[in-house]
Amino acid sequence: MVAAADERHYGWVVLSNTTLGVLMVTINSSILLIALPDIFRGLGVNPLDAGNASLLLWLMMGYLVVTAVLVVSFGRLGDMYGRVRMYNAGFAVFTIFSILLTLTWMTGVAGVWWIIVLRVMQGVGGALLMANSNAIITDAFPPDRRGLALGLNQVAGIAGAFLGLIIGGVLAPIQWRLVFLVSVPFGLFGTWWAYRKLRDTGIRRHASMDWWGNLTFAVGRIAVLVGITYGIQPYAGHTMGWSSPLVLSALIGGTALLVAFCFIETKVGEPMFHIDLFRIRAFSAGNLASLMAALGRGGLMFILIIWLQGIWLPRHGYQFASTPLWAGIFMLPITLGFLVAGPVSGWLSDRFGARPFATSGMLVAALSFVWLLLLPVNFSYWPFAAALLLNGMGMGLFASPNRAAIMNSLPPAQRGVGAGMSTTFQNAAMVLSIGIFFSLMISGLSGSLPHALSSGLVAHHVPAASAERIAALPPVAVLFASLLGYNPIQSLLGARALHQLPAADASYLTGRSFFPTLISGPFSDGLVVAFGFAIAACLVAAVASWLRGGKYVHKEPPADQAGSVALERVWDPVRR
């Protein structure tokens, strides 16, 4: 029998290693957002050229799509063959493809597609890590300490998405390959450490693979996410592609496959997705809350980047080329909020249960979105920073208790697949939020941006035909230019047209004030719609968090029922 002190020491070994793995995965989920301009320049590709929007979107979303699709299957494999074994393989796969990304030798469009493919394979390693890390932590910690442990892990993961913006902004201007190389030493160390120190302590349950379930789930999820990816791109003269036959086929066909998947999972003997787990109120309510919170949080990152890079930073004297780095720096308060509130709420939830902290966290997050909505587009920084800090604290207050409550509700033999299911909701929400928030922003911009752009250009001696041509471009091109930290007018007009203008007009149009001032009004219209959705998502998450019930830890079945999985609602005797 291992001494209690040794078990406590092993728990912290598990937590430190899994937190390193999750932090590495989430940093890489966002690091390209800031590094994209330098990557495209390094490969000799203009992302704003016609036809290159797909490259831009797949570089951003390919990694997220594969992690969203595979985590349930990998969690199931962890339950069957050992969670530590699957986790260790994830560290190795992630590290191998980080090295290959660093060594990319191709240029041009072929080089971009090569990076996309390698990023997808890197995402396979990330899915292995994310699918099993929470289950390994749950196995290593007793219920009275899981909240703090899972909270630290969860907060590190969420904070990693924002830290990736800063790391990408620092490294990419030096050399774009460094954004991939930075993961290699941590991956090598983590792989060695995981193989040396981690051991399987959870219940392993051998079962046959649910091939039909895996196939319908993977194809259905990929089809839906592909449909969302192409739905925010222009199609046949429309600002977005939601009426495209390809998009409609992907969304309808993918949804039909997911419905078929749910039916299959109720019929097979060993399903990959245990629908019965949703009979546990703490599990189902926690996952609904997690889904809605991730929808609000995921879109916020993109809105803030566009807001800072495309409008606020240029209007306050920053060059367009330097805005990606400064956008990451000015978003630090949200990360600080996560780091302050997350561990504290996780520790407190071990004593008092998740409901009060998760519910209040979502109400605080909704309040922060109201605060951001009331700010002028050209805000003063400190009120903006305070709103971000409040948002981070609200999300941190929610995330740790919610994840601990989800994991505590699971039977030991189902922790891998349950963690995978929970991570699937969260990762899918990140991809879905991109489609939702981009669509909402484009809808807000499309009403007023064309006229504002056309009249503004004509007023500075741009020929009416050229002004109308630029004004007719889909708003997504403007969003992409702002997201990448490009000078949009310089990119849209072109060098030849600028040389034909009076020098004073050309200088003003490509300076730091014309485009940010021009887009401020239309962007404000988009913010109202987007932040309104985020507020609604947080309020739904708050309701779901409150409806989860009192503190609940799954009770082990009696020894003579060890072969079965108990899914009854066994509530803690002390209702909290």
Image (spheres, rainbow, N blue to C red):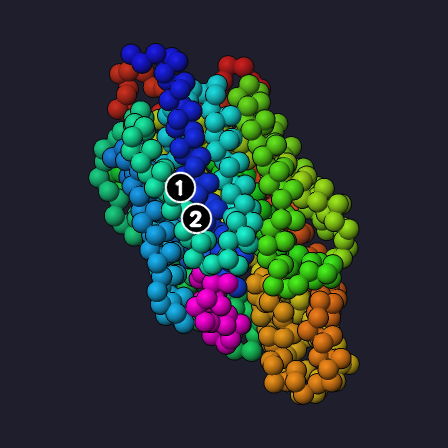
Q: Nearer the viewer, residue 317 or 406?
A: 317
Image-quadrant location for residue 456: bottom right
Q: Is residue 363 above or below residue 53?
A: above
Q: Nearer the viewer, residue 499 or 449?
A: 499
| Residue 186: numbered disc | 1
x and y, in percent, of residue 537 in the image: 61, 46
Label 1 element class: helix
Report the residue at 58% width, 27% height from top.
Answer: 345
Q: Report the magenta residues as a range.
A: 38-59
Q: Is residue 465 above or below residue 219?
A: below
x and y, in percent, of residue 378 in the image: 76, 57
| Badge 1 amino acid | Phe
Q: Nearer the viewer, residue 401 or 566?
A: 401
Label 2 element class: loop
x and y, in percent, of residue 153 in the image: 48, 33
Image-quadrant location for residue 437: bottom right
Q: Is residue 89 above or below residue 17?
A: below
Contact? badges 2 and 1 (CB < 8 Å):
yes
Horizontal placement of 508 versus 440: left or right? right
Spatial CA span between label 2 and label 1? 8 Å
Q: Quadrant of the N terminus?
A: top left
Answer whether residue 50 is magenta in the image.
yes
Report the residue at 58% width, 22% height from top.
Answer: 348
Q: Quadrant of the C terminus?
A: top right
| Badge 2 amino acid | Val
**Hey, which residue is sitting farthest front in the picture?**
174
Q: Which residue has dot 2 on it?
A: 182
x and y, in percent, of residue 461 in the image: 74, 85
Q: Residues within 10 Å of mark 1 (few under 14, many from 20)?
A: some
